[in-house]
Image (cartoon, rainbow, N blue to C red):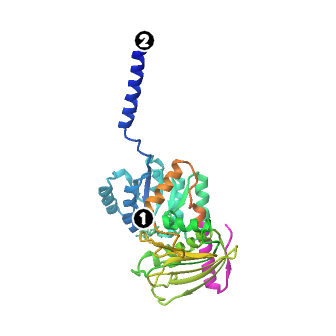
Amino acid sequence: PMNRRPFIKLAVGASIASVYSKAQEPAAAPKKLGWALVGLGSLSKNQIAPALLKCERSKLAAVVTGTPAKGVEWREKYGLTEKQVYSYETFDKLIEDKDVDVVYIVLPNSMHHEYVIRAAKAGKHVFCEKPMANTAQECREMIAACEKAKVQLGVAYRCQFEPHHQEAIRFSREKVFGAVKHVNAEFGFKIGDPKQWRLRKDLAGGGGLMDVGVYALQACRYLTGEEPIEISALETKTDPVKFAEVDETITWQMKFASGATANCLTTYNFNGANNFTVTAEKGRFGMGPAYGYSGQKGWTSDPKVPFEFPATDHFVLEMDAFSKAIIDNKPFAPSGEEGLRDLLAVEAIYKSVKSGKAEKVEAV
Ligand code: NAD
């Protein structure tokens, strides 16, 4: 039998050894979910794929493209195998790909509906670019398909993950400047190539409003924390040839249940509109630039309340947040319902442009 002294020595030695070896062990790498990108256009190429290389919880696991040459280019650039490159015809085979957890739909707006539903049927969680679809009815069908398949549906509203926007939301919720009374929000830009899908109603669903106006609309919703109940809108069109199918410039006003109001602008015809201002009971705050990939700047009416954060990659933040929600089995926001609520407001805006009257926003 062992006498006491060597036993203590052995035990202490063993525990030192175990502490020592634990310290030597690298921390277990966090689990990364595999993402499949559908549509290799400019957003996938310039923002999403580079962001995936920086993510902690997400990695590129497949691509879907209709252009074989792009498949070759992406294989070389991102070290993908032949099997990891799908076409729109082989898309549904994703069901057999165990390395793909999430399918990210980065196609023209009108195609979101079909591919979100097909991804859900393949048993994959789905992340969908904004605007979620061309109509509220399509959004409802996408939500239902994901519920049926028991997969999560996230909408890529990247600003909700950006620290300035998050701080602005905190100012509102915690009434740092008192209750929010009015929001002014604008986002637009001068669009180039007259042949692009963004100017075709069947593919884009609408013009500036569908593409970038939704950011201003979203901001009003998250800055008031309320849903618009009534909307009044008007459109101006200075180039009926270029904007034959879609809206050029729209301004709209919204009324919320608390009595708060919002005033918004979107355009495809000039640069510079990229901001919001919140007027609350005891002060004001705002951002400008507000909605681009970078360059966010905040200001407040009170010099004692700072509003400045370092630059972030919005795509890294939103994709990792979606992966984390799936890993932790927690609901993700912004979900499909957020996309649907925006489309309901968008439909009221277009209805008001046509009728020339204030229109009610349909309930979810
Ligand atoms: P894009 O034109 O650069 O790319 C679209 C891709 O879809 C291309 O690869 C194209 O080949 C493919 N495609 C497949 N079928 C097509 C068809 N019938 N017509 C046209 N293209 C077809 O567009 P994008 O800028 O990458 O936008 C894609 C989506 O991402 C849109 O829904 C857009 O609103 C959204 N988006 C979001 C942000 C953001 O900041 N979150 C920024 C830009 C675009």
Asked whether 53 or 242 is in front, the reply is: 53
Question: Does residue 174 show up magenta in the picture?
Answer: no
Position of 271 relative to 36 (above/below): below
Asked whether residue 205 is in view, the answer is no
Asked whether 30 or 238 is in front, the reply is: 30
Asked whether 3 or 36 is in front, the reply is: 3
> Which residue corresponds to the image point at 55% horizontal and 83% vertical from the top-left?
250
Q: Horizontally, is 94 left or right of 344 in the view?
A: left
> Which residue corresponds to the image point at 48% horizontal and 90% vertical from the top-left?
238
Q: Position of residue 181 (x, y in %)?
A: 64, 76
Label 1: which secondary element = loop
Q: Position of residue 162 (x, y in %)?
A: 48, 64
Q: Amino acid at mark 2?
A: Asn
Residue topped by disc 2: 3
Q: Horizontally, is 241 left or right of 145 in the view?
A: left
Residue topped by disc 1: 310
Q: Quadrant of the C terminus?
A: bottom right
Q: Position of residue 214 (x, y in %)?
A: 54, 73
Region in magenta: 340-364
Instruction: Name which of mark 2 and mark 1 comes first in the sequence.
Output: 2
